[in-house]
Amino acid sequence: MNNERIYNMVFGGVYPLYVQKAEKKGRTRAEVDEIIYWLTGYDQVALQQQIEQKSSFEAFFAQAPQMNPNVVKITGVICGWRVEQIEDPLVQKVRYLDKLIDELAKGKTMDKILRK
């Protein structure tokens, strides 16, 4: 896994891909945003600022108000890696987000995605 590449990726460049993946499967931008708010503690204004500032994933997660304590409930495989076993904390956070968006696109309910 090329961690340096992940650190420097611009969150705002990947965000539209998350939305596109969800919308292709009949889900909405609002649901993608809800997942991001739940995971990171950002609200609509702060999320939009991160996108406009072209924040890297490293900055995006470093500036996140608060990671949800239930992230430990996110398990499974994404991109060939078990998310609960990823050792690099930033890469793990990115993969948590990837996993949640993937679950959204696969049709899971928001309650299950948000580990309620």
Image (tube, rainbow, N blue to C red):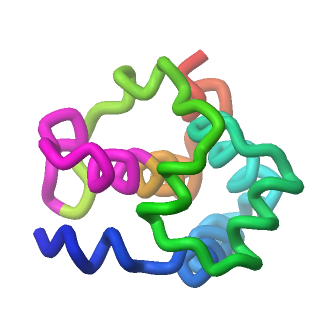
Q: Is residue 26 left or right of residue 99?
A: right
Q: Is residue 15 left or right of residue 10?
A: right
Q: Is residue 89 magenta?
A: yes
Q: Is residue 101 visible?
A: yes
Q: Nearer the viewer, residue 23 or 17?
A: 17
Could you tell me residue 54's position as x and y percent? 63, 80
Q: Main secondary structure of the magenta part?
A: helix
Q: Nearer the viewer, residue 60 or 27?
A: 60
Q: Quadrant of residue 83?
A: top left
Above or below: residue 115 compared with residue 106: above
Q: Is residue 23 left or right of residue 13?
A: right
Above or below: residue 109 compared with residue 33: above
Which quarter of the figure is the C terminus placed in? top right
Q: Is residue 109 visible?
A: no
Above or below: residue 75 compared with residue 105: above
Q: Residue at x 51, y 79 (%)?
A: 10
Could you tell me residue 113's position as x and y percent? 55, 34
Q: Residue at x 43, y 57 (%)?
A: 98
Q: Quadrant of residue 22?
A: bottom right
Could you tell me residue 11's position as x and y percent? 55, 72
Q: Residue at x 79, y 66 (%)?
A: 49
**Stretch in magenta:** 80-96
Above or below: residue 106 compared with residue 7: above
Q: Quadrant of residue 40?
A: top right
Could you tell me residue 8's position as x and y percent? 37, 78
Q: Nearer the viewer, residue 68 or 108?
A: 68
Q: Residue at x 11, y 69 (%)?
A: 1
Q: Is residue 104 magenta?
A: no
